[in-house]
Image: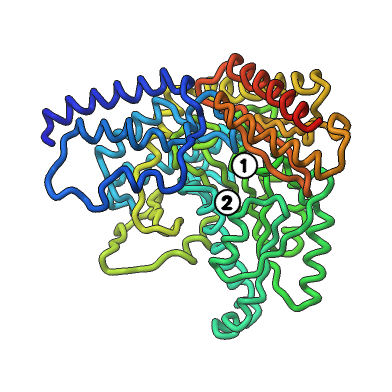
Amino acid sequence: MDVTEFKKRGKEMIDFIAKYYENVDNMPPMSSVQPGYLYSLVPHEAPEEPESFESIQRDIETKIMPGIMHWQSNNFFGWYPCNSSFPAMLGDMVSSMLNVAGFSWICSPAATELETVVMDWLGKLIGLDSRFMAIKEDGTEGDGGGIIQGTASEAQIVVMVAAREMAFDRLKSYGMSDNDIDMIRHTFVAYFSDQTHSAGQKGANIIGCQARIIPSDANFRLTKCALQAAIIKDRQDGLIPFFVCATFGTTNTAAIDDLCGIADVAESENLWLHIDAAYAGAALACPEFRPLARGIERAHSFSFNAHKWMLTNFDCSALWVADSTHLVNALDIEREYLPRVKGGTNFVKDYRNWELPLGRRFRSLKLWFVMRMYGASGIRAYIRKHVKEAKWLETQLVEDGRFEIMAPVVFGLVVFRVKASIIAGNDHDVNWTNAELVRRINDDGRVFVVGTKLRGVDVLRPTVGSTFGTSENTALLVKVIKECTTKVIAEYN
């Protein structure tokens, strides 16, 4: 493909994308294919000779599209949103054009420096403390800063490595040698609640520490008292607490942990405090939500996914650290083929030392496009629109009389179930009814939702958050929920 054909095909692909977004709401959000469907439709070896663009385009429409879950449908209410926007797509196009492997400043200075600047922009937009900024108000370099990771899971693992490094340094200050520390690594303990994202357990598995899963309270929150009690017991058993993850907006219910209380414990026990705000962190762009996040200013690290609820195409997970020293010390590996900048190094960040991979894409471009083309006011309006729609959804379900809300509706998530009194059966019957309701809604094909379990109780958890969604889409969700509920209850009775 030469430049002339690229220009022709590129315009055709833009038209294809635009047409997709214009018509995506007319497609069932959920794919109906069976596992292995694609293997029978495509050759089992790469083609020996070049194939035409037209043949590839046909295969996208006839073979790929049937197996797509349409996350960008405005009738998609599953999990948490995976936002896209046209400005972000344009930024990604520029990134693909340049195709830099920006593992250090010298690889492409603009790639490093734009990320530093944009992460400060984003941090200020959501009200982060100045400790997390790379550039101080006086223009000098700060101890902290931000980096774009692939996902919040990657961010979790990276900060756990940094936390372990901080714990190593503390033990060395007590006179322990590297060999001594190696002998007790297995006694290190990281703390999570039973509502923490699975990335916590995965991170513990990867770095080889123990994971203590602490039961959440009645509101599905990790509390100061529960954390302190777990640490006391572990210390009595000869273990070494070193890390705790608090969540601002859990996956199941969007609950907010006791951030201030957890920060108290982390400070008194010398733990690294990470706050995972993968979904709800975007809401902090709106000042009215910031009182809910008191305590994050005391954390060692904070992360949220701009690709969830801030209009930036996957992947774009924002991570800040208040002090990058332990992170860089843990991940910096010198090689002759990785040259460093000579002389003054102010504002020069080798982001390879802030993440697990070496190479990295120019992801800050799409975030830069989004923040400039929407502006802070546009991002705030976007968040508030979804919260308003979620509140309306809550009202509709409550007024119906057959449903109960299972967790406070604070952001875009509404957790509910059919009331036990409507079923007039035992717990098994109530759970069956709500699980069956999820299946019926998705089989209907007009909208998509997911269910979950809260301490053994089946619930539904639709999330309002699509890029181009309107009140009409939320109204359709309500209509489908009510219709399918009537059918499920009639069949049960």
Mark 1 neighbour class, 10 Å CA radius: few under 14, some 14 to 19, many 20 or more: some
Mark 2 neighbour class, 10 Å CA radius: few under 14, some 14 to 19, many 20 or more: many
- Seen as rendered, the residue at the extreme top is 472
* In the image: residue 10, left or right of residue 354: left
Check if mark 1's residue and mark 2's residue have beta carbons within 8 Å: yes
Q: Quadrant of the N terminus?
A: top left
Q: Mark 2 belongs to which amino acid?
A: Ala
Quarter of the image for residue 61 reads top left
60, 360: nearer the viewer: 60
* In the image: residue 166, left or right of residue 27: right
The disc label shown at residue 322, or none: 2
Q: Residue 382: where, in percent of width, then height? A: 56, 22
As helix, strand or loop, the secondary structure at mark 2 comes to: loop
Q: Which residue is mark 1?
A: 129
Q: Is residue 21 above or below residue 115?
A: above
Distance in Å between CA atoms under marks 1 and 2 = 9 Å
Q: Quadrant of the C terminus?
A: top right
